[in-house]
Image: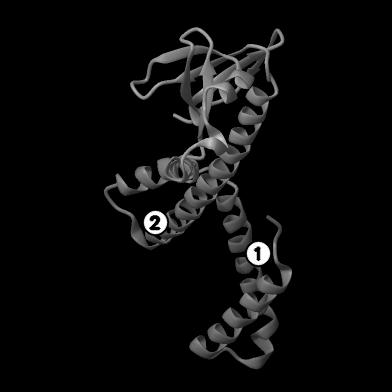
Amino acid sequence: MTLNRTEIMTTAWQETRATMDRLSYAAHQLREVFAYCLRRAWAAAKASVALLARSAASLWAEIQDIENRDRLGFHGMERLGQLRRAYHDAKAREEAEAETQAKADIVEKRDLIRSAKGRFATVTFIKKDGSERVMRVQPAKLKFHVKGDNAAPSARKAAETRKARHPHLMAVWDADKAAPRSVNLLTVTEIRLDGMAHVFEVAA
């Protein structure tokens, strides 16, 4: 994030006018007061940018440190307020980034498994109980064991509803069990295809 010079100048002039009125400074002192306020505005802007660049974890650690102090004082309270605002912003930003990355990973994993077609692919994923599962799948074979467009209207509607509600689940053909199964693409850690391993990070 870059510094907004216009915003900094506006803030400096606002503080200058407020300071001149509050402390009844003479007109010839305007330049000196403005210089002081401008330095403060620049420092505040740089501090704000620095906070926005930090991770939510590092901000939370500093918040905890300040909250555990015996005395805060005015500057401590002011810093705490800045940190809390920055923490909420960082948390929201990181969650949005994680969601975007998860969606991209789902598309990549789904396309990669489908690309195997009639060949075999080995998919490693984490089950609900936290254990690891390795499944050998053969994507093209699934269509011979599901009715698809030939299914009853109620069955097609149910399938569409499941797909809409659970876009992270992918129906596959388990070659070893000779049965259709579902894979949670969010927890897939590795896909092996044509002798190549594609490794993915999974959020804790």
Q: Amino acid at mark 2?
A: Gly
| Disc 1 secondary structure class | helix
Q: Position of residue 173 (x, y in %)?
A: 53, 18
Q: Nearer the viewer, residue 134 or 80?
A: 134
Q: Is residue 83 above or below residue 201?
A: below
x and y percent of residue 73 in the render? 34, 59
In the rendering, at what x and y percent does residue 87 appear?
46, 51
Q: Residue at x 68, y 89 (%)?
A: 28
**What residue is pinned by disc 1?**
42
Is 7 drawn above or below residue 87 in the view shown? below
Going from N to C along the chain, the mark reached first, 1 or 2, is: 1
Task: Give left or right: position of 46 versus 6.
Answer: left
Alpha carbon of mark 1 to alpha carbon of mark 2: how far? 20 Å
Question: Going 54% across and 20% down the picture, which residue do you hit?
Answer: 189
SS at circle 2: helix
Residue 61, by quadrant, is: top left
Q: Which amino acid type is marked by label 1?
A: Trp
Colouring style: one colour
Tag 1 near tag 2, CB within 8 Å: no
Residue at 57% over, 79% down: 15
Q: Residue furthest left?
A: 70
Reading the image, the residue beneath label 2 is 76
Count neighbours of disc 2 (C-alpha within 10 A) and say few if under 14, some if 14 to 19, many if 20 or more: some
